[in-house]
Image: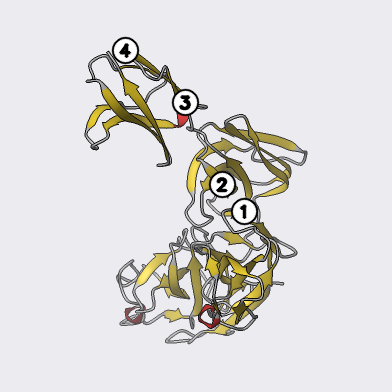
Amino acid sequence: MYQKRQLVGVRLWLSMLCPFVLAALLPLTASAQCTYNEGVSPTFNISGNNTASGYTTVVIAADEAGSIAYISAAGSTKLPALAVGKYNVYSFNYQGAAPSALAVGSNVSGLLSGETCAALSSPISIGVCKCTDELPASGPLTLSLTASGHNASAGYSQQYIVLGADGKISNITNTPNFEFSGVSAYTVYGINYKTGGLSGLAVGNELSALTGDCFDLTPPVELNVCPANAMPVTLISFEATAVENVAHLSWSTSEETNSDRFDIQRSANGKDWKVIGSVKSEGESKVTRPYSFIDVKPITGINLYRLKMIDRDSTFAFSSIKNVRFDNLIAGSIFPNPVSDQLTVKVADWKQVKNIAIHTLAGVKVYSSGPVESGSIDVSGLESGIYVLRITALDGSDSAHKFVRVR
């Protein structure tokens, strides 16, 4: 639910018929840290400003020390795209030429110095976050994670813990499926423990309250859930599927207004996202439009995908997150073994290979390649003995194979 926040401004040296008011259409949430997503250009409603000829109104975003960081275009109520940070937002109304203090880097305290016809509203405090996820327009945000490596033997239990921004347990689940309905920072852990041997696992406790003879926590997955931004498109489907050694992404829209493009983002941990491609959107449409993208270089393990749907004015929103798993993209084989001259290396997908190296058992490197697209290596120049061939993937994973060089 969205409500208006209105603040009455201070009227200085300017006679107005009504109070000078800056109002932002903001979701009123428990977390003041994440009013907007990084890169959003927020629009504000202004009333009470002097609109007579010769008067101009701008919107200003200043940091907590009062230094001006962003200024809207003259007469516009829309700020430029905002970087991560905390800001106080003002509307500034002035007569004639813009004062010299109206500049990025100047302090808002100097805006009224020496000006006989100017007014500055009271501020609205906002926070801009680097969001990992956004709340949908309606309903909670749903997210599924994949867990592996835990002890699945009889007598052991596996559960999942969600911590709120206060560091206390807010939810405990038996499956890695979660719902988030509030704007906040969350941290998710998997916990594997000997059944009956764990104490302190309860909502409201901190992790420090956990005690037991045998339990293990996964590394944390951190989420920063932000308010939903207006969607430049109506997304009706988004799917990600593994097809051999590539990921096929497909999505459809039922309506587009002023849409520019879709950036495809990938992450291995749900926190750090990388743009791996972009697809131009239709722009204006009232019918179903299908789109697709192929990730030809997925990483070994879990690949998380999302769409960044970008409007022509640079506002954007994120889709839900889909995941695809790829195992052993470079786990290969070598032959013949022993070998005298040509060693053949086979891998599932050469596009995933960064380089191949050969070391002696003492760790001395005797061969190294750059990017390779085939697996024939001339080893005729090597001394007889045992060697280790190591295949390194683009994502940093590797696969090692011993072979014997004979004459």
Tell which residue pokes out farthest to the right in this image.
287
**Residue 333: % across, % down:** 47, 25
Left or right placement of residue 361 versus residue 276 in this view: left
Position of the C terminus by quadrant: top left
Looking at the image, which residue is at 46% across and 59% down? 80
- Viewer-side label of 1, 3: 3
How crowded is the residue under tag 4: few (<14 C-alpha within 10 Å), some, or many (20+)?
Answer: some
Q: Earlier in the sequence, mark 1 or mark 4?
A: 1
How many angstroms separate mark 1 from mark 3 (CA)? Answer: 28 Å
> Which of pointers 2 and 4 indicates the residue nearer the eye?
4
> Residue 302 got which mark?
2
Mark in the foreground, 1 or 4: 4
| Pointers 3 and 2 in contact (C-beta within 8 Å) | no
Is the C-beta separation of discs 2 and 1 under 8 Å?
yes
Pointer 3 or 4: first along the chain? 3
Q: CA distance from mark 1 to mark 4?
A: 44 Å
Tell me which amino acid carries mark 4.
Asp
Q: Quadrant of the N terminus?
A: bottom right
- Tell me the mark number nearer the camera, choosing from 3 and 2: 3
Q: Residues within 10 Å of mark 1 (few under 14, many from 20)?
A: few
Q: Which mark is residue 146?
A: 1
Classed neighbour count for the residue bearing mark 2: other residues with Cα under 10 Å, few (<14), some (14–19), many (≥20): some
- Which residue is labeled 3 in the image? 333
Q: Earlier in the sequence, mark 3 or mark 2?
A: 2
Residues packed near mark 3 inside 10 Å, few (<14), some (14 to 19) or many (20 plus) = some
Between 209 and 294, the residue placed more toward the observer is 209
Q: Secondary structure at mark 3?
A: strand
